[in-house]
Amino acid sequence: MVAACRKVQPNDHVPVWFMRQAGRSLPEYRASRKDIGMLESCMRPDLVAEITMQPVRRYGVDAAILYSDIMLPLKAAGVDLEIVSGRGPVIAHPVRTPGDLEQLRPLDPERLWYITQAVELITSQLGDLPLIGFAGAPFTLASYLVEGGPSRDYAATKALMVSEPSLWEAMCIRLADLSAVFLQAQVAAGATVVQLFDSWAGSLSAEDYRRYAQPYSARVLRAVADTGVPRIHFGVGTSELLVQMGTAGAEVIGVDWRLSLAEASRRVGHRYALQGNLDPALLSAPWPVLAERAREVISSGASAPGHIFNLGHGVPPEANPAVLAMIVELVHTEGPQLRAAARAELAEASTAGGPAASSRSQYT
Ligand code: CP3
């Protein structure tokens, strides 16, 4: 997994994990969470370790991801918020004026003691398997803070962004610094990879992303640059933003299902490892069809200098865990051959027809 992030992936292994691999799709998760609120569960190191390990035990994935939430550092900093099951984060006092920023105070890393303890517990159980730490990108966090909860069109967020640029900047800098403290705490305690989630960045035009989102994501990514841990940068609906996401600083770009990995890699100049991108909605398709799609993802991912297999977004709550287990098995058993064959074909195309030929490969 770490080798793939660093673009030195051996052909004999395609790593795989799933965004939201811990969560409501697992009966053991539902049992662990019984009668315990989401954010409360994130503050109990024993429970965090248990829930983080559940999908590792069940699926044999190549990485664990810390069970926590992108909103947690805001909660730790004193923002009055809740995570409502089936809905998402809900903020008591949405941000509308400069005075509303008072709730975003700098976060003393000591207040994340339960994260430190949980990460230490998890890494002691993981052996050589990497633990992915994560944080939310400022735009996605801001969308919850301004809307007060989940939104379809982000109208209040975008209106504030373009009409109050100095308030927007002040808010995003505070959010970037909260996410930076969250990431640094996870890495200091032993997380070996990090992922920055900018889940809702795809709602922005490329120009607005460049002005109002990318600089603050870059600020978060810079905060962990000198730790040397590989950084993954992911968003949904970001086909038109991939180049600018790349320049924000991560080594790996996460791609949703809207674009083939070969085309994504072409757009970013084959300079990054890619993560993705099986459509999570297809998890309910009959296995032979789904298996074929998983194979196509592996072949297409061979265009990138490193590929980590994942879904294009999180595991839906109604997903069948048995299907996810079959995907892991397929990626591990068929992945090496599929990747090697696709890479051989790409190499042949580029020697036969010059550099341009490889981008005309059947996998684009
Ligand atoms: O397994 C993992 O991926 C690690 C844990 C994780 C959670 N949230 C646990 C969680 C991670 C990485 C996140 C990140 C997160 N949180 C994001 C970015 C990723 C993405 O999905 O785009 C976002 C946007 C949030 C905010 C948030 N928290 C939402 C939208 C929700 C879902 C609301 C719902 O119930 O549908 C949450 C709650 C949440 N975070 C759950 C989990 C397991 C479900 C809680 C429950 O059991 O009800």
Image: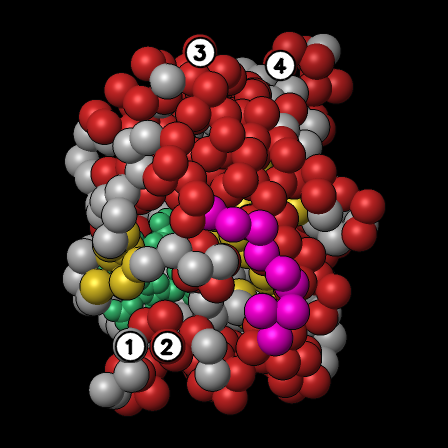
The answer to whether mark 1 and mark 2 are in CB contact below 8 A is yes
Magenta region: which residues? 104-113
Q: CA distance from mark 4 to mark 2?
A: 54 Å
Q: Is residue 108 magenta?
A: yes
Q: Which residue is mark 3?
A: 207
Q: Residue at x 56, y 21 (%)?
A: 244
Whether pointer 1 and pointer 4 mark residues with C-beta atoms closer than 8 Å, the reply is: no
Q: Which mark, residue 40?
A: 2
In this rendering, the answer to whether 82 lies above or below 204 is: below
Position of residue 12 measured from the top left corner of the image (x, y, whole percent): 69, 58
Q: Which mark is residue 276?
A: none
Image quadrant of ligand 1?
Answer: bottom left
Image quarter for residue 291?
A: bottom left
Q: Residue furthest front?
A: 99
Place of residue 307 in the rendered image (x, y in percent of width and height, measured from the top left): 60, 45
Task: State yes or no: residue 140 in magenta.
Answer: no
What residue is pinned by disc 1?
Answer: 37
Image-based side of 290 in relation to 255, left or right: left
Q: Nearer the viewer, mark 3 or mark 2?
A: 2
Tell me: residue 111, above or below residue 141.
Answer: below
Q: Is mark 2 within 8 Å of ligand 1?
A: no
Q: Which residue is mark 4?
A: 357
Name the residue: 46% across, 34% down: 171
- Label 4 or label 2, whichever lies nearer to me, is 2
Secondary element type, mark 1: loop
| Residue 292 appears in the rendering | no
Identify which residue, 255 or 211, lies in the foreground. Answer: 211
Query: In this view of the protein, which residue sits in the foreground, 182 or 307?
Result: 182
Residue sitting at x 39%, y 31%: 98
Badge 1: residue crowd in 10 Å (few <14, some 14–19, many ≥20): few
Q: Are marks 4 and 2 in contact (CB under 8 Å)?
A: no
